[in-house]
Image: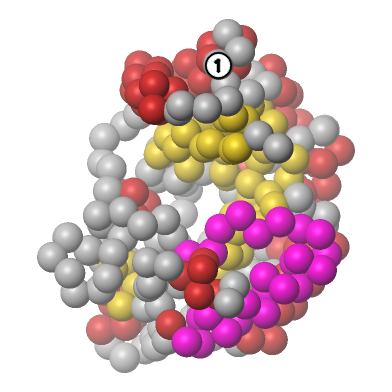
Amino acid sequence: MKKQYIIPIFVPHLGCPQNCTFCNQKKISGQEKQVTGEDVKKTVNDYLESFKEEAYIEIAFFGGSFTGIPVEKQEELLEAAYEFVKEGKVNSIRLSTRPDYIDKDVLKRLKKYKVGTIELGVQSSNDYILKNCKRGHTFEDVKKASKMIRWHGFNLGHQMMVGLPESTRIDELNTAKDCAKLKPKIVRIYPVLVIKGTKLEEDFNKNLYEPLTVDQAVEICKELYNFFEKKHIKVIRMGLQNTDSISKPGSEQSEVVAGPYHEAFRTISRI
């Protein structure tokens, strides 16, 4: 079985119509400037030079809501990535987006550039929680988008969160069950962290929001991981990727104010 490599391209807050209470992609990714096609080419070439073995390689556009970016910018970035697919240097392209930014024209465009996987930011299947977090969509949007993505032949991915304001363990288990019914191939599970510059930070400072502890987040994520494994849905990430800006709360460079951060969160959630 070939090793799998992801080449990440961060497009923070491009295309995102909302400012969700928990989100600040520029802080999370540590990246402020707008990405160009030339940036994509340079990043991909740099990664390819570091790969020393034959592998299945995907270029992944993370952050923001890719299909909400102006079409010209989408095509600029996709064209740059697609060149590597045509040359046989990369196997596929994946991206993440919002469920309310999926329609037939969008999917037709992504097919043109050989996108293989579309991940939807679900976060919760509870509409009250979604509204409270200012997501700007409902779970009905998730259902419609998921079905369209699968019908058009893409691999479907879901991203969900635990520890959202007013969310309970039951809410999170129900979200997992509701997602599983839509048959994603992959899932990411993100415990909520309090990030600088967000509405959630304001609420935390006013004692209106209490984040999960590491132990609490590990307990629920372990339960969710086991649930998805039994459904043959692969959990490809638990917890945010470690970067200089996403590190232990209180450290000099960290943008994390509070919450269940642990540099080995996935590992301890699977023990």
Q: Residue at x 26, y 57 (%)?
A: 245
Outermost left residue? 252
User: x, y percentage for residue 95?
Assistant: 57, 38
Q: Residue at x 44, y 60 (%)?
A: 240
User: x, y percentage for residue 17?
Assistant: 47, 48
User: x, y percentage for residue 260?
Assistant: 40, 78
**SS for tag 1?**
loop
Residue that badge 1 annotates: 89
Q: Main secondary structure of the magenta part?
A: helix
Residue 111 against residue 86 in the figure, above or below: below
Quarter of image, res 247: bottom left
Quarter of image, res 115: top right
* Residue 231: in magenta span: yes
Q: Say if residue 141 shows up in the picture.
A: no
Q: 216 and 31: which one is in front? A: 216
Q: Which residue is drawn at 58% across and 25% down?
A: 54
Which residues are the magenta region?
A: 215-239
Residue 246 relative to residue 87: left or right: left
